[in-house]
Amino acid sequence: MPTDDLPETLRVSTDEQLRAVSSLTRHRIMAVLRFEPATITQIAERVGLAKGSSSYHVRLLERAGLVKVVRTRKVRGVTERYYAMAARSIVLPDPGEGGPDVLMRHAVADLEASPADGERQVRMAHLRLTEEQFAQLAARLHALADEYRELSDPSLPDASLVFALFHPASRAQAEGSAK
């Protein structure tokens, strides 16, 4: 089921889209659909939900324009719909000062839910970089993620890559926001 005609990116911009991506369940459904289309039944099995719950969440994602029906077929008199992402990647708006970062919350939840005996690579490094080095590192991280996304094979198990490169709040800023 080719999805080659998908746009490269979809920028989340409406309140409806923001609400749709803020749910961990819908985030996991979009993860199922990132490589290949799936039916409600397939999504329910992969995410571990009842079909009715999966259908509800997929309808919200579809209404928000984040997923779409890419194929239908008749099975025992019932129309079966195959859903896919509406774009190859979803770009979230900057959460702004003090705003919640949906991607990081979902990444932490996914990491915590991953098998404890599975292979994990988690690292945090504190760096001191010039603005030019900061920009170069950001570009390299994005390029590396794009390179491996292109190499992804839907028949292989999922692996998630999350990175955050940022300037942390100064001690004075952190103490001021805690008050």
Image: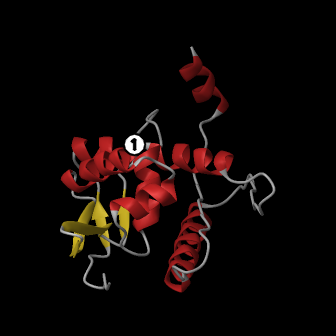
Question: Along the horizontal axis of the image, is 42 left or right of 111?
Answer: left
Between 138 and 145, the residue placed more toward the observer is 145
Residue 77 appears at what percent x and percent y?
Answer: 18, 68
Question: Along the horizontal axis of the image, is 171 left or right of 135?
Answer: right
Q: Which image quarter holds the C terminus?
A: top right
Outermost residue on the top side: it is: 179
Query: Can see residue 167?
Result: no
Between 127 and 143, the residue placed more toward the observer is 143
Query: What residue is drawn where x is 48% and y is 58%?
Result: 45
State the scheme by which the image is colored. secondary structure
Q: Which residue is mark 1?
A: 22
Residue 174 is drawn in which quadrant? top right
Q: Which image quarter holds the N terminus?
A: bottom left
Query: Can see residue 36?
Result: yes
The answer to whether residue 67 is above or below residue 27 is below
Between 79 and 115, the residue placed more toward the observer is 79
Query: What residue is drawn where x is 32% and y is 76%?
Result: 8
The answer to whether residue 28 is above or below residue 32 is above
Query: What residue is drawn where x is 74% and y is 57%?
Result: 122
Question: How dense is the environment of label 1, judged by Cα within 10 Å: few (below 14), some, or many (20 and up)?
Answer: some
Q: Secondary structure at mark 1?
A: helix
Residue 15 appears at what percent x and percent y?
Answer: 23, 41
Residue 164 is drawn in which quadrant? bottom right
The answer to whether residue 85 is above or below residue 109 is below
Query: What residue is drawn where x is 60% and y is 59%?
Result: 163
Q: Which amino acid does the dot numbered 1 rest on?
A: Ser
Residue 25 appears at what percent x and percent y?
Answer: 44, 46
Residue 121 is drawn in which quadrant? bottom right
Outermost residue on the right side: it is: 117
